[in-house]
Image (cartoon, helix red, strand yellow):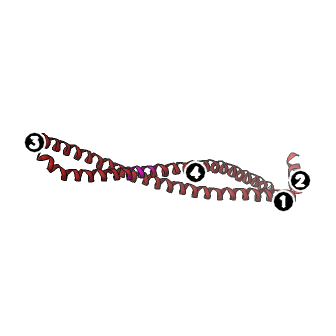
């Protein structure tokens, strides 16, 4: 009776390990697909960030040129103020418009820097999450391998014990029928 219970226990243990192995294999495949998708998203994010940095650099350069031009213009405006009232009004209006445009440009550059910083933070978080996911997949794969080894071991043990105990088990089964 003890030998039969032992063999039944080995069968259940082997089936449990086999089911675990198959379940983990399915999860690993799904995880690998998610990792591949995450890597693709990271690459796209890096391209977008590089594009954003290039746009920001162009904007900063353009703002710097406009400021330089405006400063040169301001030094020339004193000559225009010597003209009658119309020249002075034109200079003041142009001065105010230029200051407003420069202010808007500075706000855009500041917003761009903020977006770049936010993008860098998101990219870093994505990289961290991806590496964490890869690490978890490695751990799950080790567990899956252990389940596979356990399945093979307990199957072999069941076969060996089944053959060596076959006479005792067949006697028990004949008595149980009678």
Please report the residue visible at 43 percent of the width from the left and 54 percent of the height from the top: 120
Say whether disc 2 or disc 4 marks the residue closer to the N-terminus.
4
Q: CA distance from mark 1 to mark 3?
A: 113 Å
What x and y, as percent, mark residue 69? 26, 51
Q: Residue 177's image quarter?
A: top right
- 161 horizontally vs 81: left or right: right
Q: Secondary structure at mark 3?
A: loop
Question: Is residue 154 shown in magenta?
Answer: no
Q: Which numbered dot is residue 69? A: none
The number of callouts visible is: 4
Q: Which numbered dot is residue 35? A: 4
Circle 2/circle 3 CB separation < 8 Å: no
Mark 4 packing: few (<14 Cα in 10 Å), some, or many (20+)? some
Mark 2 packing: few (<14 Cα in 10 Å), some, or many (20+)? few
Q: Secondary structure at mark 1?
A: helix
- Say which of marks 2 and 3 sits in front: 3
Q: CA distance from mark 4 to mark 1?
A: 42 Å
The magenta stretch is 51-57
Q: CA distance from mark 2 to mark 3?
A: 126 Å
What x and y, as percent, mark residue 28? 63, 51
Q: Which residue is mark 3?
A: 84
Q: Which residue is mark 1?
A: 160
Mark 1 packing: few (<14 Cα in 10 Å), some, or many (20+)? few
Q: Which numbered dot is residue 171? A: 2
What x and y, as percent, mark residue 37? 57, 47
Q: Secondary structure at mark 4?
A: helix
Magenta stretch prevailing secondary structure: helix
Q: CA distance from mark 2 to mark 1?
A: 18 Å
Say whether disc 4 or disc 1 marks the residue closer to the N-terminus.
4
């Amino acid at each position: 009776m003890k030998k039969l219970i032992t063999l039944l226990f080995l069968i259940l243990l082997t089936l449990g390990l086999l089911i675990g192995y198959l379940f983990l294999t399915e999860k690993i495949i799904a995880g690998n697909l998610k990792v591949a998708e995450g890597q693709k998203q990271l690459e796209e994010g890096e391209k977008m960030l590089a594009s954003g940095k290039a746009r920001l650099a162009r904007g900063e350069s353009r703002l710097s040129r406009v400021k330089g031009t405006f400063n040169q213009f301001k030094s020339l405006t004193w000559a225009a103020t010597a003209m009658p009232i119309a020249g002075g009004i034109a200079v003041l209006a142009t001065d105010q418009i230029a200051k407003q445009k420069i202010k808007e440009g500075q706000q855009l550059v500041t917003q761009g820097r903020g977006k770049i910083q936010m993008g860098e933070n998101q990219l870093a978080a994505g990289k961290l999450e991806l590496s964490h996911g890869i690490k978890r997949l490695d751990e799950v794969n080790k567990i899956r391998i252990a389940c596979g080894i356990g399945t093979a071991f307990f199957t072999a043990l069941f076969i060996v014990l089944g053959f060596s105990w076959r006479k005792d088990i067949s006697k028990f089964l004949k008595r149980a029928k009678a």
